[in-house]
Image (cartoon, rainbow, N blue to C red):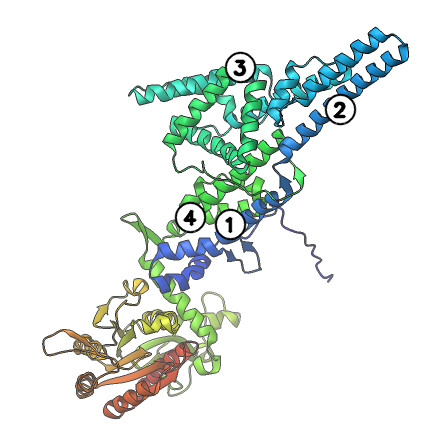
Amino acid sequence: MPRPRFRYSPWDGTQSGFDLDEFDLLEELSDDLLYHGDVNSALRELLQRGLSGPDGERLQGLREMLERLRERRQELLDQYDLGGVYDEIADELHQIVDDERTELQRQVEQADASGDERRQELAREAAATRNAELDMLPADLAGQVGGLQRYEFTSADAAQRFEELMDRLREQIAQQTFEQMSGAMSQMTPEDLSRMKDMLAELNEMLAQRAAGEEPDFDGFMERHGDFFPENPQTLDELLEIMAQRMAATQAMLNSMTPAQRDQLRQLSEQLLEDMDLNWQVQQLGSHLQGLFPDAPWDERYDFRGDDPLGLTEAQGVGQQLGQLDQLEQALRGAVDPGALAEVDLDRVRELLGDQSAESLRQLSEVSQRLFDSGLVERREGRLELTARGLRRLGQNALAELFRKLDRDRMGSHDLDQSGFGHERSFQSKPYEWGDSFQLDLPATVRNAALRGETAPMRLHPDDFEIEQTEHVVRSSTVLMLDLSMSMPMRGNFLPAKKVAMALHTLIAMQYPRDYLGLVAFSETARILTVDQLPEASWDYVYGTNMQHAFQLARQLLRGQSGTKQILMITDGEPTAHINAWGEPEFHYPPIRATVDATLLEVGRCTREGITINTFMLDPDPSLQHFVEQMTRLNQGRAFFTSPDTLGDYLLVDFIEQRRELIRSRR
């Protein structure tokens, strides 16, 4: 059989990326969800870091996208020189003046060659007068343009070049104004400029109407001028926000110029755009928008460091691109949940960052909805919370993660080597042997007959008989005491401990449904947790490890339970708090004798009530080891010196092995 052949190519946005599975999503969220105890915080962290698929596919996170935005912005700043807006004009004006001086000198030389003294005198006077006018031209560009507009050129070529330069500058400044006001970015015509003036006048009028409490005719405005706004705003507020973003981007480019450069551009605009009403409308709108959107980047400026000179038109385009990068960065930074990403313009993301970023953003925006549609989360009072199904799945994820780390030979299942009778089904069967109790597994027996070739009506043979295997019914009642003092997250112990708690609950619920599991969290004081509260439980911002109070609550939970009773305590510190005679928590570090005695007193009460205490110590110091040794001598329980990486191995294996021993002891 020929081997299949595969071809690989870079992802370009047309191939189908990996599809987000809601269970994989929840597993990806598990660590952050358990650490923070909050679905919303876990989703925010997922948005920031992104995620990888099972085959190495990658969804970019917001951190990566923001870094790419910063890199793209820096590339533009490192490439261009904003001073080029004027260098090109200055060079051409200098060349025009040189051409004029050359023509004046040529005319003087022609007069000298003629031998006509009168002609020579007039030529020299005219040349001296015009050269003096050229010498008197201001140093600034706007002054030079104004002076040359009043100057009578001798050189026809210089005059023609100057008029062509003025036409080009007039078109560029008009185009700059047009692009500032319109997102269409098309080539401007005189008709467009006239329509834009009408549009600005109507927009300023609508703002005046709104200020007077009237309702502007937004729909009519869009019918007449909607082609200026490819973003297709649906309300006047959306339109004003779009205009504010455009004008703020233009203002940022002006801010990036030197004061002299800004003044030059203003003067050039006034000289070359004869329609002063257009300038007035633009200034009016800018003033209104700055008042309506004070948080827009009106004061933004860019530090251009490149060598490529920017002309007026190119500067406007680069300014618009920088403004779009800034707007996208602001939108991504402000995204506090996946739903907020749905408001981001994916076409703009694709244009600025590429197809992969746009696709990543699309899929990230659907994360919370996928979890919601699958029934893993629900909305309560505007926040996402885990459902019962989500809680079960979270526990299964924690259990599966711990089981993957366990040695299969050590783990196994909790089946017995011997079969029981009349008790709990193990959902396994075996061929009947003489002496076995005849608890027939009918489906397995019929299947054996069918495999022999029997058809209905079937004739059974003794070798077809399969019987059910059963286990002796036993019950274990456990309380898990979980240390939530500040030392747990500080030492990196909190998340592993919480995962083990979730895994233990899931293990009992799935494989030992008759067993009881209670949960007690303790720090300065202790409190009873329900299973629903466990994923949201976080460490307490208080000092103190109050084992005494935790043992009290654990005894209360176990008092109404039957079967073998035990406490499993996970901690990384010695007892440093207890409830004093006045019923108040009392903290001391190093621990005082009263705290240790009060804790050991509760250990003694647990012992008298037949409760075994098994302690799992995370990164224990000598003081904790000494206390645990005292406790185990008193209670005859066991102590495990473990680490965050091996806690699950110790606790789950120990729990299952103890249950096996319990079953064997009941035989």
Q: Are circles 2 and 1 on residues that touch, CB within 8 Å?
A: no
Q: Amino acid at mark 2?
A: Asp
Residue at (57% x, 19% y) in the render: 271
Which mark, by number, is residue 275?
Answer: 3
The mark nearer the N terminus, 3 or 4, is 3
Q: Can you name the residue that lies furthest to the bottom here? A: 633
Q: Nearer the viewer, mark 1 or mark 4?
A: 1
Depicted 392 relative to depicted 462: above or below: above
- Could you give the CA–CA distance between mark 2 and mark 3, rounded to whole angstroms? 32 Å
Q: Amino acid at mark 3?
A: Asp
What residue did someone put label 1 on? 66
Percent x, y of residue 552:
18, 78
Q: Nearer the viewer, mark 3 or mark 1?
A: 3
Q: Residues within 10 Å of mark 4 (few under 14, many from 20)?
A: many
What residue did someone put label 4 on? 338
Q: Residues within 10 Å of mark 3 (few under 14, many from 20)?
A: few
The mark nearer the N terminus, 1 or 4, is 1
Q: Is residue 104 visible?
A: yes
The mark nearer the N terminus, 2 or 1, is 1
Query: The residue tagged with tag 3: helix, strand or loop?
Result: loop
Q: Can you name the residue that lies furthest to the left here? A: 582
What residue did someone put label 2 on? 98
Given residues 93 and 575, the one toward you in this image is 93
Percent x, y of residue 423:
29, 79
Residue at (42% x, 85% y) in the render: 433
How many numbered tags mark residues here? 4
Query: The residue tagged with tag 1: helix, strand or loop?
Result: helix
Q: Nearer the viewer, mark 2 or mark 1?
A: 2
